Image (cartoon, rainbow, N blue to C red):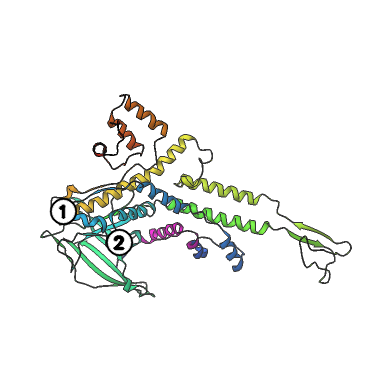
């Protein structure tokens, strides 16, 4: 019985790796040798010291936080028809707002590269005017899918999703939600178990199939979107953070070697050559200790003098610069080694390209479901749905000298009032979501304007 898409298991390994690295140092150290192999000949106690002594540079997590912060630093513009207003604050099955849904989806799409959203109606016991809600499924929960040609167009005809169920935890039973077009939209749920010896899976349908009816009609499509940074297709994409995560792990492995080398070589070790026995063997070392050695004995200190540690430090710096080119620019101060200004500009554009495309796809995916929800609740109101995420990702607050020059130009009649306000908006001295007409109306109504100012 087919439960998983042919690409699922390979991608699942990548998803787990990305999540472990984003979670950070403690998660990685608990994984032991999975991400940090034990050097040959090292004892368990030495490996424990080697593992705990390494310092993990949390580049991936910081980069993701920076990207999401850049995308959401200006509040999104959200307009809904009256029947959908409840979704503004409780848009998801978990009760999260649309803003939270946007933030979480951006984080998943930019790091893992995949998230499924399914639109549904409340079931039994809901109020007659209840709004629809959106159920969210991370990449690991998207188990299988299929596109087929329907009436001359490619359509999603099959989607299998893993559903969390607290009652099934630690029971060895999974709950799967299966959405199909056969030929109308049908919802089924299964309990799935796996035989530990044969690895064969067995599923049992736990409810009667549901064929939702909206406005008196069955649906001829699956009300779901699978969002990636590049499109709304269900086909799986390479996770955007995979390359950065791999270099981040390489940096950690070199870091562990580097700090282990420092541990072994940073403490000079005394040596004695001569006729030494238990009776005349020194018992202490340091400024307060006094050694009496047999005649002819010599002593010295073993100290590290090679260049191996310096080479490891250079390798760490090289990997840090490489991570910068893969999207962690805010972590690395300055340009990469031998990087020209033009190259730096291209690198900056590539970082923003992932951010920009992710914002476009998340915006489009959520808007698509909200428009569908509007048609379900009040046909003809889909055009009233507006979801807009700002593309102004970089802080560009206006310099005071520029503001002064603009003010003087306006006062001298060199520029119009609209041009003056537009520049204030562009320079982030005015709410980016406020129109110029709204700003002028507020100025006209403001009773706190100083006397003599028009």
- In the depicted structure, whether residue 153 falls above or below residue 270: above
Q: Which residue is pictured at 78% across the width and 68% down the height?
A: 283
Predominant SS along the magenta part:
helix
Does 172 sit left or right of 250 as displayed? left
Locate residue 21, reporting x and y percent: 46, 57
Q: In this view, which residue lies farthest toward the left? A: 216
> Which numbered mark, 1 or 2, is in the foreground of this view?
1
Asked whether residue 295 is drawn in magenta, I would say no
SS type, badge 2: strand
Does 227 sit left or right of 53 as displayed? left
**Label 1 Cα neighbours within 10 Å, binned few <14 / some 14-19 / many ≥20:** some
Q: Which residue is pictured at 44% across the width and 41% down the height?
A: 347
Locate residue 361, reporting x and y percent: 30, 48
| Label 1 or label 2, whichever comes before in sequence order | 2
**Label 2 Cα neighbours within 10 Å, binned few <14 / some 14-19 / many ≥20:** some
Q: Which residue is pictured at 61% across the width and 58% down the height?
A: 260
Locate residue 123, reporting x and y percent: 19, 66
Locate residue 195, reporting x and y percent: 36, 75
SS type, badge 1: helix
Report the disc number at residue 221: none
Q: Nearer the viewer, residue 64 or 241?
A: 64
- In the depicted structure, whether residue 90 falls above or below residue 63: below
Label 1 to label 2: alpha-carbon separation: 28 Å
Query: Is residue 61 at least partly visible in the picture?
Result: yes
Q: In this view, which residue lies farthest toward the front? A: 451
Does 319 sit left or right of 125 as displayed? right
- Magenta stretch in the rendered image: 7-27
Which residue carries the number 1 mark?
A: 375
Quadrant housing the N terminus = bottom left
Query: Is residue 193 at least partly visible in the picture?
Result: no
Q: Quarter of the image holding residue 119?
A: bottom left
Which residue carries the number 2 mark?
A: 144
């Amino acid at each position: 019985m087919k439960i998983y898409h042919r690409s699922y298991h390979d991608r699942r390994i990548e998803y787990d790796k990305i999540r472990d690295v984003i979670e950070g140092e403690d998660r990685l150290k608990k994984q032991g040798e999975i991400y940090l192999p034990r050097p040959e000949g090292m004892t368990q106690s030495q490996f424990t010291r080697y593992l705990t002594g390494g310092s993990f540079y949390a580049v991936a997590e910081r980069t993701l936080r920076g990207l999401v912060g850049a995308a959401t630093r200006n509040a999104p513009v959200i307009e809904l028809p009256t029947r959908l207003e409840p979704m503004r604050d409780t848009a998801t099955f978990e009760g999260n707002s649309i803003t939270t849904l946007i933030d979480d989806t951006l984080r998943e799409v930019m790091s893992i590269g995949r998230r499924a959203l399914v639109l549904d109606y409340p079931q039994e016991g809901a109020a007659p005017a209840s709004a629809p809600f959106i159920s969210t499924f991370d990449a690991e929960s998207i188990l299988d899918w299929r596109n087929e040609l329907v009436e001359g167009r490619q359509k999603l005809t099959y989607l299998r999703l893993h559903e969390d169920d607290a009652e099934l935890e630690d029971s060895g039973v999974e709950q799967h939600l299966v959405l199909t077009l056969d030929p109308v939209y049908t919802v089924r749920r299964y309990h799935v178990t796996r035989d530990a010896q044969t690895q064969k899976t067995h599923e049992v349908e736990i409810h009667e199939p549901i064929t939702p009816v909206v406005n008196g009609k069955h649906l001829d499509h699956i009300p779901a979107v699978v969002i990636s940074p590049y499109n709304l297709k269900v086909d799986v994409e390479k996770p955007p953070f995979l390359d950065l995560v791999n270099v981040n792990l390489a940096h950690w492995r070199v870091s562990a070697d580097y700090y282990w080398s420092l541990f072994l070589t940073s403490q000079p070790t005394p040596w004695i050559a001569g006729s030494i026995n238990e009776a005349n063997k020194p018992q202490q070392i340091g400024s307060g200790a006094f050694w009496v050695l047999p005649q002819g004995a010599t002593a010295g200190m073993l100290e590290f003098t090679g260049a191996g540690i310096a080479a490891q430090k250079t390798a760490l710096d090289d990997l840090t610069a490489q991570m910068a080119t893969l999207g962690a620019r805010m972590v690395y101060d300055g340009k990469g080694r031998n990087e020209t200004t033009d190259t730096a500009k291209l690198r900056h554009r590539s970082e923003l390209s992932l951010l920009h495309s992710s914002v476009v796809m998340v915006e489009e995916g959520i808007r698509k479901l909200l428009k569908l929800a509007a048609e379900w609740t009040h046909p003809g109101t889909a055009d009233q749905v507006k979801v807009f995420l700002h593309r102004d990702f970089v802080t560009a607050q206006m310099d005071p000298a520029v503001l002064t020059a603009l003010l003087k130009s306006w006062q001298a009649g060199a520029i119009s009032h609209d041009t003056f306000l537009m520049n204030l908006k562009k320079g982030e001295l005015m709410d980016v979501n406020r129109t110029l007409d709204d700003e002028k109306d507020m100025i006209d109504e403001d009773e706190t304007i100083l006397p003599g100012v028009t």
